[in-house]
Image: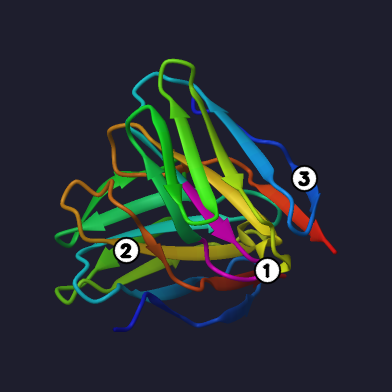
Amino acid sequence: DAGVTQSPTHLIKTRGQQVTLRCSPKSGHDTVSWYQQALGQGPQFIFQYYEEEERQRGNFPDRFSGHQFPNYSSELNVNALLLGDSALYLCASSSDGTGTSEQYFGPGTRLTVT
Amino acid sequence: GQNIDQPTEMTATEGAIVQINCTYQTSGFNGLFWYQQHAGEAPTFLSYNVLDGLEEKGRFSSFLSRSKGYSYLLLKELQMKDSASYLCAVTRGGYKLSFGAGTTVTVRA
């Protein structure tokens, strides 16, 4: 049973560029959440997708957008990259319709903005 | 506010016990998670507390007091592999997890 998978593992971008990160949830899960984790900090909630719609959003600017596909996989897009966007981006999936059940995290994508 | 406070670092000896405290603001509180995160890896689920009391799971136990806005994670019979960051996270009736900054535990031989 495959767990949560994310791609790519690492990514280096230049300021002003755009990036797309991908996530496939754990088998049987229908809810995907995205988190940003800066070095030495806890993960910060970006948004959650359920039934292909953004259900809740954290305190992140509109440069951060996402999408969920019919197979429950998800993408995180970040436009106009800033140096401060350098972080580990974690995807988490869950199966409870309320979205508050245990969330399973993927290995993350390490984004470096230069 | 969402302040979730936990100590930054703790050090203990192999075989010992360590208790990691977490305090949070009680408004809207729904439940509390503990995650373990090794350096460069994803957080992995340890425990979930909704009701007051102690939940024991092998060498790890988690306690919650809803009225006091307080939880702790107890790690017994410490092993070298327990060296990691331990994250306290709260849900407040929405869908997101609000995390503390994490406590780095170092286990020494």
Location of residue A114 (image quadrant): bottom right
Label 1 sits on a secondary structure element that is helix
* Amino acid at circle 3: Met
Is residue B4 at all visible to an observer of this figure? Answer: no
Q: Name the residue under label 1.
A: B81
Q: Mark 3 points at which residue?
A: B10
Mark identifier at residue A93: 2
**Residue range corresponding to the magenta coloring:** B34-43
Could you tell me how far apart the alpha carbons at marks 1 and 3 are, in whole angstroms? 15 Å
- Judge the density around disc 3: few (<14), some (14-19), many (≥20) Cα neighbours within 10 Å: some
* Amino acid at circle 2: Ser
Cβ atoms under marks 3 and 2 closer than 8 Å: no
* Amino acid at circle 1: Lys
Q: Of tags 3 and 2, which is closer to the observer?
A: 3
Label 2 sits on a secondary structure element that is strand
Mark identifier at residue A56: none
Q: Which residue is drawn at 73% across and 52% down?
A: B105
- Judge the density around disc 1: few (<14), some (14-19), many (≥20) Cα neighbours within 10 Å: few
- Tag count in the figure? 3
The chain letter under disc 3 is: B
Could you tell me how far apart the alpha carbons at marks 2 and 1 are, in whole angstroms? 26 Å
Please tell me which residue lies in front, B25 or A19: B25
Label 3 sits on a secondary structure element that is strand
The chain letter under disc 1 is: B
Q: In this view, does A76 lie above or below B54?
A: below
Cβ atoms under marks 2 and 1 closer than 8 Å: no
Q: Which residue lies furthest to the top in this view?
A: B67
Q: Position of residue A11 (x, y in %)?
A: 60, 79
